[in-house]
Image (cartoon, grey):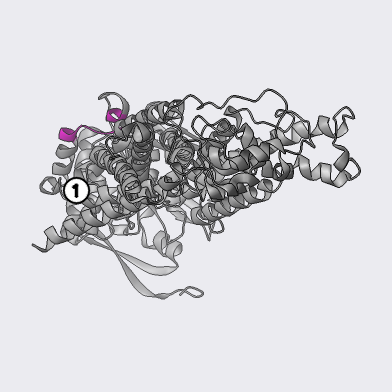
Amino acid sequence: MSFLDAHFLWLDIVIAAAAIAAAAGAIGVHTTLRRVVFMPAALSQLAGAGVVVAFLLVHTLAQEPVAVTPAAPVDAGTSGEPGLDSLHSHGLETQSGNVPETEPLPIPMADDPNVFAEPSPDHAGGAATGDHRSTRSEPSPDHAGGAATGDHRSTRSEPSPDHAGGAATGDHRSTRSEPSPDHAGGAATGDHRSTRSDDEHGHCPPMLPRALAMVFACLGALLLGFVREGRRVTREWLLGTVFIGASATVLLVGGFIQQELHDVNDVLFGNAIVIASGQMLEAVIVSVVIVALHLALAPAFLIHAFDPLTARAHGVPIRILDGLLFLSMGVAIATGTRVVGALPEFAFAVFPAMTALSVVRRPRLLVAVSAACGALAAFLGYWASFVLSLPTGASMAAASLLIFLVVKGAVAAAGRR
Amino acid sequence: MRGDPGSEVLVRLSRVAIGYGRHPFLEGIDMEVRKGDFLALVGPNGAGKTTLLHTMLGLTAPLAGKAWSAAGVRVGYVPQRGQRDPIFPLSTLDVVRGGGRGGRPEGIVSRSLLSRPDKALAALDLVGLANLAEVPFREISGGQQQRVFMARALVREPDILALDEPTAGMDLPAERDLMDLVKRLAEGRGMAVLLVTHQLWLAARHAHRIALLNKDQGSITIDDVSVLMSPERLSALFGRAISIVVEAEGPRVVLAGPAREGRP
């Protein structure tokens, strides 16, 4: 099947990725000019911290009543070992089959014809596979590792015997997958030691992690943007602190919510392969608003950022301008990271702006060219990923770098003539 | 025209203390700036001139006392010469447009935050740089950049023109041209001028009043040029013997002797 013939597979995600890349390109002009190019990376991690905190909150709240309710049935095989109950409640029971007995929750994309739901061989590591309720039900081989390293090859793979480890695959509400005998066995022999419902396991309302990711990213953007640099505290220092602190939070909290880790990765990092149509619409709306805002205010953003002291003396509402700028950064990064992943989002916030700065000077043209370069990189990256069976997120990042190098080379060559 | 006692008060400081952090180094400052005034802030390096200027403009809050400015007063500010980040791809005209609107609204959103191109070009013409309007700002010399900042301040048609060492880095003809322009505009438009300078001759030739600051001595003295621009006052301020030579073009301030005891 050619790339074009398979448009029904990629159209939504390419539209979403291009929109997200355009928004990142628009904000990238400012992160580059203000010399805070690592801000998107720090904000991505903050968004991740927001997601894991959301899952931890729900997980913790759901734990309390279960821990004290004697009515919660416990399998005889484990009843004598209180320690195991604790482990199960942290998600380890998926190794032995965690098929919920209550009514399964619907998968948002269950009817989406664009969705491949076949798990890949390596996906057994995703602890929550058994009752995978993600909007994206197509894990990639390295998806559990996080950042948007989806591989098209995985989208077409048939479930392998290895996947038997994901014991709850019988509950995997795939629209296309044919459960293998191993899966069936896994489901049939599922060891129902825990009878807690999905909700008792702390199933997270889908909006909560996204909302907290957005809040964390926006607050972080405002903090990093408005920090008053002094002799002891520099913005670089703070960027490093936020990045490390948020990364450590994700890893530390992740240890307490292993069962939800796959959902965390899904919500946070995307896989740039499949997407819910609602998410595509959200990405497009966010992108249109952010690009329009930056096109409208680009001259004011740039010219006053050039000399903020004078702008203040002249009565320019510099704090309002900066507030709009940094909030838009937070929204763009939180949304973009979820759609395409941290690596390509970071790349879209750096290389398109550098490309635009190589060829144009006018503030609005800078934003427009940067946004266009981001969208082009998203499309080219996806195309290369599809045709060459490369990891999608990395392909998009590489495409944005390649565009920059080609343009920079052309400008240098033109200058020599 | 000079700021006479009957003209409109634009800025007033009452019992103001200024300093770094929470530590005041000059206290009890009482002063007014009136329409048409030309006040020079003079003192050694680190005397607190720029801090005082920023307090008058509302950029820095006083540590004590009250800083007041008239409602709707427009300030045109020329900052100290410093290294501007060359990564910004702005043209000279863009920088001048950053001066913002003058007395009349010019549009919505970003337009109201920026001057119209034709007005920015006219301001550039005032400082003799209209031919560089489309040249990237980062590619012009430091002295030319200061003149561009002057154009950016003037495009606002300010009530107060605040100049923080505006002629630093300029050659002599450019320096003289610029100060003549400032004086002409101040007299023609009736705007007040606040001038921070190390160059005593600039203060002596152009200002009406002088504020002599020295934070090491904890002192600030504000009076007419004719009163303060004396060898005794200046020698006491700088700790060096200073003479004033009167020439046809105006007074010239010169060092007249070795350092005083305890001073380098």
- How many badges with numbers are in the image? 1
Q: Is residue B111 magenta?
A: yes
Depth check, front residue: A17 or A368: A17
Q: Is residue A339 magenta?
A: no
Q: Write down the quadrant of residue B229 in the picture.
A: bottom left
* Crowd class of label 1 (few under 14; some 14 to 19; many from 20; radius 10 Å): few
Q: Chain of mark 1?
A: B
Residue B48: image x %, image y %?
47, 54
Residue A224: image x %, image y %?
51, 46
Say left or right for A256 vs A121. Answer: right
At a point 22% along the width and 37% down the height, the residue shown is B187
At a point 63% along the width and 34% down the height, the residue shown is A170
Q: Amino acid at mark 1?
A: Asp
Say left or right for A97 vs A243. Answer: right
Label the magenta part by its dominant secondary structure: helix
Q: Point out the image quarter for the N terminus of chain B.
A: top left
Residue A398: image x %, image y %?
34, 53
Q: State the extent of the magenta-drawn residues as a range.
A: B110-119
Depth check, front residue: A217 or A146: A146
* Secondary-structure class at tag 1: helix
Depth check, front residue: A306 or B232: A306
The reply to whether residue B249 is visible in this rendering is no
At a point 38% along the width and 50% down the height, the residue shown is A347
Say left or right for A308 vs B207. Answer: right
Would you place residue B237 above or below residue A70 in this image?
below
Would you place residue A18 above or below residue A254 in this image?
above
Say left or right for B70 vs A195. Answer: left
Q: Residue beneath label 1, please?
A: B180
